Image (tube, rainbow, N blue to C red):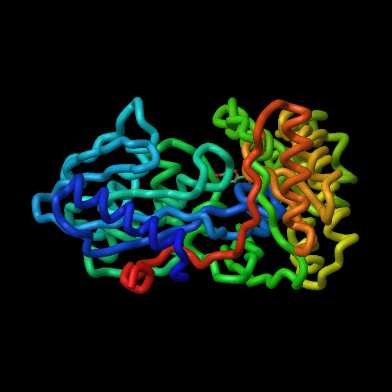
Amino acid sequence: MLSTKAAVNRAETVAARFREKFASEPELWARAPGRVDLMGSHTDYNLGFVLTLPIDRDTWIAARRTDDGIVRVHSMNLDASDEFRLDRIASIAESRWCNYVRGVAAILQSEGFALTGCDAIVHSTVPMESGLSSSAALECALTTVFAGLGGWSLTPERKALLCQKAENEFVGVKCGILDQYSSCLGRRGCALLLDCRDLSTHAVRIADGIRVVVCNTMSPRRLSGGEYAQRRAECEQGAAALGVSALRDVTPEMLAARRPELPERTARRCAFIVAESARAESLAGALRAGDRPAVARLCAESFAGARDLYEICSPAMEAMMEAMLTAPGVIGARQAGAGFGGCMVALVDAASAHAFRAAVGDAYRGATQVRAEIYPVEAASGAELFNVEEITK
Ligand code: GLA
């Protein structure tokens, strides 16, 4: 990890909070990144393709083993703490954050991993509730901590699947594999083309001169819980009507021929997923080759489909899209995450990234009176332990 001034400050702040809360020094540090999807909205639970970028906004956990079988965790971002016994893990109705922590511990134990009690401080630079997978970053960093303290290891693939299981079964969010896979399998400098059926990944190096810029609408993802489950159910209905186990098995030709058999809304949902999954593969090729016209076209098609076919856009997203598309240096722009607000993503000419940022901020504020957060991101490595002394020395 790079020893920048920001990283040194962050490490010192987290260590100071650890001392204040637990009157001791942390013995182990872990980190796991958030992600931004470059193409492939909602394709993961349809077993299609996603092009994802694990980003240099991440969650850090500083921890120390205890021998009383109790997990004590404090989140600096929320200024909230949780404490539970490993032999009695129950979910908490009023706190989703606590349930991510408890869910990871419960699932790891149910899979036979030996956990030790611990004191831990969590600090994240992944914005919450904004579509950049802050929850997956927490789950994956925490699993890394438990493995490090317990003296066992597991592959990044297994780690991702267990974290997804914690979210599906303990937290009760039926997410796909995208977020946890991105957070565990990241590689510095590369986007990943993820095949959600066989869970293989291919590293994609984005051509020089193209930067990824995240543009946060700052509008919370309202309704996304219910709407997400509804989209998922509609896709399952479409797959069942077409006689396949997942929309991954539907080709554009097959959909065109059988579309009249489907209810109109189901047909639109299916049309989006089938095209979006194909676009993820196409965008991987276009970004590798630096084919800017193809990047522009694929992103525009994705946003139009998200708006008209999958209906996951909001007025704030439309305003941000307008701001991104009229800013200097833009190559392509689209939604990110589940939609319904949150962050969007632009591919921008590297030399214009500064001007892009300023222009998007001004235009979005002019249209909505809201100050957006806009930041270029870099591809980061996946969940891992790290040596804090390499940062602070
Ligand atoms: C959320 C889910 C993911 C994925 C995206 C949409 O981030 O957690 O599994 O479905 O939405 O692509």
- Could you say which quadrant of the image residue 343 lies in? top right
Q: Quadrant of the N terminus?
A: bottom left
Q: Quadrant of ligand 1?
A: top right
Q: What residue is shown at x 25% (from left), y 57% (from top)?
A: 63
Q: What residue is shown at x 44% (from left), y 66% (from top)?
A: 156
Total numbered circles: 0
Q: Quadrant of the C terminus?
A: bottom left
Measuring from the top left, give residue 188's x and y in whole percent. 56, 70
Q: Residue furthest left?
A: 68
> Would residue 353 be seen by someone viewing this image from the given angle?
yes
Q: Relative to 134, is 342 on the left or the right?
A: right
Q: What residue is shown at x 16% (from left), y 45% (from top)?
A: 87
Measuring from the top left, give residue 215's x and y in whole percent. 67, 44
Q: What residue is shown at x 83% (from left), y 35% (from top)?
A: 261
Measuring from the top left, give residue 185's x and y in whole percent. 51, 65
Q: Nearer the viewer, residue 165 or 391?
A: 391
Relative to 22, residue 229 above or below: above
Relative to 295, residue 42 above or below: above
Measuring from the top left, give residue 138's x and y in whole percent. 41, 50
Q: Residue furthest front?
A: 5
Q: Nearer the viewer, residue 256 or 191?
A: 191
> Would residue 86 be seen by someone viewing this image from the given angle?
no
- Could you say which quadrant of the image residue 291 lies in? bottom right
